[in-house]
Amino acid sequence: MEPAAILDALVHSEALPREALRAAAERRADMVPLFVAEIDSYAAGGGRRVGNAPLFFIFHLLGDWREVSAYRALARLLRCPPDNVDAAISVAITMTTHRVMAAVFDGDPHPIYNIILDENADEFVRSRMCETLAMLALQGRLDRAEVASFLGDCWIHLQPRDNCFVWHGWQSAIALLGLVELRDLVKEAFDRKIIDPTWLDYQDFEHDLALALLNPTDPWHGKRDEYELFGDTIEELSTWYCFSEKYRQERERARNTPPVPLFPPSAPARNPLRGIGRNDPCPCGSDKKYKKCCLQ
């Protein structure tokens, strides 16, 4: 496949485009500049906006390839308005953004800091970026003390102060890194309900913190896969329900099944204006002809 055809297939496919993904990998040197340009164009407002999540497969391929040259373009994408990010990468927002961004990290954490501190960015992306910092620190690719300092400063600078999921990722990163020096700040966040109690409570944080202190190099407590760098695109996405044969069959069945009306009529529908001629008196009682009144 030619690069243009590969790009077109990746941008417009709803099913898992295995052939295009393999072809892209074979022509990686050609595809990376096209992918970065596509991301930058979208982030600037001039990219493709047709189809379902047009940057979804591009996003994951760049993570799969550990393409550090795409790091800043992806960071710009993740700071787009939430609706635009959702339209571009869909469920990747909560499922894989942290794993992809850790995979393409180029050594400079400031683009990630900027996403976290941007109160106009998607709150779930911001939350995951906090966990990206924890991943990088645990892998030794980012200084732990620097991350701890940033997370501590977030108590002052992070906005909004409530009803924002970024605080969930903030406490999660603190727990994963075993930052006992920030425990009191997390306790205050729970006491003030800055961290919504419907998400979790302070005992959950304490439990995660204790596990991290017991296993400082492996604090994932049964969720290691969730915090590994994103892997092979086809292998990983093949396990997702939305790309399964069962999902495809259910969608096809739904398309072929007539919709059931929300409020089925109890009697056949009747047109009350049936039989009224254009020149007859209008049934609304205006004394005008029908064609000069309600028919208009």
Image (spheres, rainbow, N blue to C red):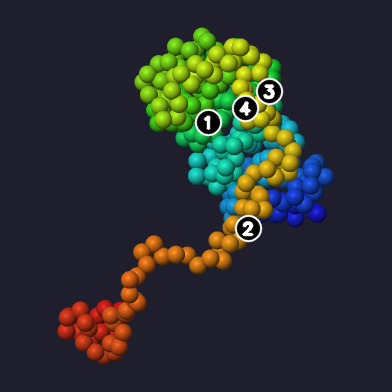
> Which of marks 3 and 2 precedes in the sequence?
3
Element type at mark 1: helix
Residue at 37% across, 67% down = 264
Q: 64 or 206, which is in the foreground? A: 206
Residue at 62% across, 27% down = 223
Q: Which quadrant, please, contains the N terminus? A: bottom right
Residue 73 spot, x, y in % from top left: 64, 36
Q: Residues within 10 Å of mark 1 (few under 14, many from 20)?
A: many
Visible residue check, residue 33:
no
Q: Which quadrant, please, contains the C terminus? A: bottom left
Question: Compared to 147, does 46 lie above or below?
Answer: below
* Disc 2: which residue: 249
* Disc 1: which residue: 126
Rounded to the nearest angstrom, the CA distance separating label 2 from label 1 is 35 Å
* Disc 3: which residue: 107
Q: 79 or 283, which is in the foreground? A: 283
Rounded to the nearest angstrom, the CA distance separating label 4 from label 1 is 20 Å
Residue at 61% across, 22% down = 221
Q: Nearer the viewer, mark 2 or mark 3?
A: 2
Q: Amino acid at mark 3?
A: Gly
Q: Amino acid at mark 1?
A: Arg
Q: 150 or 215, which is in the foreground? A: 215
Question: Compared to 293, does 17 lie above or below?
Answer: above
Relative horizontal placement of residue 290, taking residue 161 as reference (left or right): left
Q: Are marks 2 and 3 in contact (CB under 8 Å)?
A: no
* Disc 4: which residue: 223
Question: Compared to 59, does 169 lie above or below?
Answer: above
